[in-house]
Image: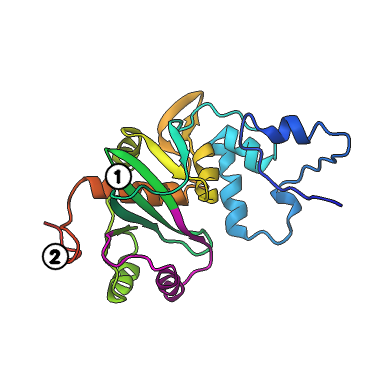
Amino acid sequence: GQIFMDYNPSDEFHWIYDKVLTREDCTFIKSTYLDNPFLPAETIKEIEQLKKLDANYWKIYGLGERGISEATIYSHWQYCDVLPEGGDEFYGLDFGYNHPTVLVQGSLRDNDLYSDEVIYRTHLTNSDLIDEMNRLEVSKKIPIYADSAEPQRIEEIRRAGFWVVPADKDVEKGIDAIKSRAWYITKRSVNMLKEVKSYKWKEKDGAILDEPVKINDDGMDATRYGVHTHTRKQYPTAGIGRGDIL
């Protein structure tokens, strides 16, 4: 008899605004982070930093008001159903704990980029992550480009048999690597699709800066790690000198 819908108003235009909120049988309740007594102090600090970092993000995630995107980084992406067969495949891995750990499978075909969300979960230890990768049958013959700030985690995953190497984390070049080709994201990648719609440049005094806002970007980071590092062609083919830089 009732449906409860929870969302952040990060899209400038959405069918929720036009077809749901306008219904006579719909009740709209606006709440913010201040209404959540269980929110960790780390998350509160991250949200309140948006006051200085980005006025639009503060409006969305701090005040719970409808956002107006003026500096979205990726606007060229499209939906796809599955990754294509016969592509040049790789993974990107962004570590987290309170933030989600994200594993994205990428594929390049005819210079087009295809992305599929494989893992997107919080509170994963490295052992949990390895178990999940085995359960999902993540290939041990395809390179995984992981956050280079976590060398111990990389080494542990390598010892579990996966071909994992540190990623090149250059943000500007990584974003350029994605923007320079057509980009398709699978429809089932629900968390990545949320991220890409609100992933944007920082703004200061009305000027757009060459630096992304650091919030809700774990899938974007994992994708960037994979695409940029793989297209640099630093690493050898699977099974030869696994993990060594040429």
**Residue plotted at (76% across, 46% down):** 31
**Residue plotted at (29% across, 42% down):** 109
* Magenta part of the chain: 117-143
Which marked residue is nearer to the observer: mark 2 or mark 1?
A: 1
Q: Which mark is residue 50?
A: none
- Residue farthest left in this picture: 246
Is there a contact, CB below 8 Å, between mark 2 and mark 1? no
- Identify residue for label 1: 108
Q: Position of residue 102 (x, y in %)?
A: 45, 58
Using a 10 Å C-alpha cutoff, classify the residue at mark 1 as few (fewer than 14 neighbours), some (14 to 19) or many (20 or more): many
The quarter in which the C terminus is drawn is bottom left
Q: Position of residue 36 (x, y in %)?
A: 73, 55
Q: Position of residue 243 (x, y in %)?
A: 20, 64
Using a 10 Å C-alpha cutoff, classify the residue at mark 2 as few (fewer than 14 neighbours), some (14 to 19) or many (20 or more): few
Q: Magenta includes 44?
A: no
Q: Is residue 140 left or right of residue 33?
A: left
Is 8 or 213 nearer to us in this picture?
Answer: 8
Q: In which quarter of the view is residue 90 placed?
A: bottom left
Residue type (three-letter) at the residue carrying disc 1 = Leu
| Separation of marks 2 and 1 at Cα, in angstroms | 21 Å
**Residue plotted at (56% across, 50% down):** 46
Q: Position of residue 10 (x, y in %)?
A: 61, 37
Which element type, helix, strand or loop, lies under badge 1? strand
Q: Is residue 201 left or right of residue 181?
A: right
Residue type (three-letter) at the residue carrying disc 2 = Ile
On screen, residue 36 above or below 134: above
Q: Is residue 3 left or right of residue 123?
A: right
On screen, residue 127 above or below 175: below
- Identify residue for label 2: 240
Which element type, helix, strand or loop, lies under badge 2? loop
Q: Magenta includes 122?
A: yes
